[in-house]
Amino acid sequence: MKQVSSTKSFGGRQAVYAHQSGACHCEMKFAVFTPPEETHGAGPFPVLTWLSGLTCTEENFITKSGFQRVAAELGLIVVAPDTSPRGEGVPDDKDEAYDFGLGAGFYLNATQDPWSKHYNMYDYVTRELPALIEKEFPVDAARAGIFGHSMGGHGALTIHLKNPEQFKTCSAFAPIVAPSQVPWGEKAFSNYLGSNATDWADYDATELVAKHTTQTEILIDQGTADNFLEEQLRPELFAAAANKAGQKLTLRMQDGYDHSYYFISTFIEDHLRWHAERL
Amino acid sequence: MKQVSSTKSFGGRQAVYAHQSGACHCEMKFAVFTPPEETHGAGPFPVLTWLSGLTCTEENFITKSGFQRVAAELGLIVVAPDTSPRGEGVPDDKDEAYDFGLGAGFYLNATQDPWSKHYNMYDYVTRELPALIEKEFPVDAARAGIFGHSMGGHGALTIHLKNPEQFKTCSAFAPIVAPSQVPWGEKAFSNYLGSNATDWADYDATELVAKHTTQTEILIDQGTADNFLEEQLRPELFAAAANKAGQKLTLRMQDGYDHSYYFISTFIEDHLRWHAERL
């Protein structure tokens, strides 16, 4: 693991690291915020993993969301990985489209050629990265949560539902909740996973919640002015499945907000407090 | 004036506009944040102008500083122009260097060819843009302040010192305070203004404060881990001149902070409250 950058922020430290990933067979970058020692001591701290959306890298969340102010106050470590494998030899969408390939790993383990060698973001986020974080940073792994935006909201929901003991709390901004039923997910899943519907269901929050409810309440914020709301996001599908299955859910429709980081930054404080209170 | 974008943020609205500038003879963009009507009504509101640093556009401050949270709370309109003229026919540094030409207007009126036609950011920021803002937005022009970062801190200090009745309050992050004595300023001023030292002094905060003290206290935050501190920024030069002239100044050396927006976002709340209390 090598340090790419390290910058003081709200008394804490916002750093970016790179390492050779065994899961993704390439160099991966991730960001880590550690809270101020002056006010919080040396830890161990609860740890949140943030998963970003399509086109993002490890930089978007740490430069645009403003989360550091609240994480510094609450004493949280926040980890934000890149959204896909990168680098020489990592295949991309044939048209370099934004919604598949580089920047669009969908937090799954691909089973199809040529994707299966590198596109293993599920293993990366649930196994390899947490082990590295636990080794290198003062985290209390028993107090871990996950959250994300859009494609990263999909990642957070599916990973929480499948690993509720590892990632105990979950929230999302404008998540893709039913990838098997929307164009972004159909494109990604058919390429990464092939045509087997069972494989799709295992990465679809709306399908998963029917089988894997968790003990905690999930928080979702969704802007009503989000251009992707009706075609790609469709939170009502997840809400109906959660309700039927008995999964506690708080779905807040936020009037007039869009899909951008202006929306995320407005409500990021709520999400951090939500996780901190439950961890 | 045409709207480029408009996004809800912390209950208010973060918009970007474009218009044909008479001062700069090109299309100019600027950002405007307006606070939430629900909590603050329709105005008029105090107005702050933010001036960004080298390489920035109207986007950097509005995406990275997190100022909207506090401006929404306090009921402030915040205007953030681009940092130079742009577009076809606008000359740039011959090597496209980051510290001169596009993205580096230095908030002055150039007197030398080929710069003098377009590079009139002083007139733009002090005359044309405020008139447009007053016409189009619910501002109380009698309650106006100015602040900025690095090259934009230089702009804020010089514009405040020369126009203390128009821009009544002033603060800066890591400002260039003595451009006549540092490489960034020497390069820009010799190109934009020629070799006449009198012309340089009129845009040099350390020279200006000797002649134009203001009634209010100026706030400067400077990170001690700023790579540009010793060669380009040198706040001690301004502090000494201000002290000698009787200009009230609060210069805070912030331990361990660098020149980035992580530094700005950490202290932006202090600056907004500082201005709001004095306007």
Image (spheres, coloured by chain):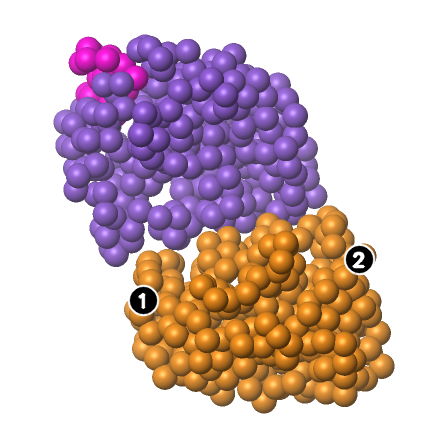
Chain colours: A orange, B purple
Tell me if mark 2 has few (under 14), some (14-19) or many (20+) residues whose alpha carbon lies within 10 angstroms of its own. few
> What amino acid does circle 1 point to?
Gln
Whether pointer 1 and pointer 2 mark residues with C-beta atoms closer than 8 Å, the reply is no
> What amino acid does circle 2 point to?
Glu
Q: Chain of mark 1?
A: A
Residue A167's mark? none
Mark 1 vs mark 2: same chain?
yes
The location of residue B22, given as percent across then percent down, is 52, 12
Side of A214 relative to B233 (left or right): right
State whether residue A50 is above or below residue B91.
below
Q: Does the magenta portion include A229?
A: no
The location of residue A257, given as percent across then percent down, is 69, 50
| Residue matched to label 1 | A3
Side of B71 relative to B11 (left or right): left
Side of A152 relative to A246 (left or right): left
Find the magenta span and give its range: B192-210
| Residue matched to label 2 | A231
The chief SS type of the magenta part is helix
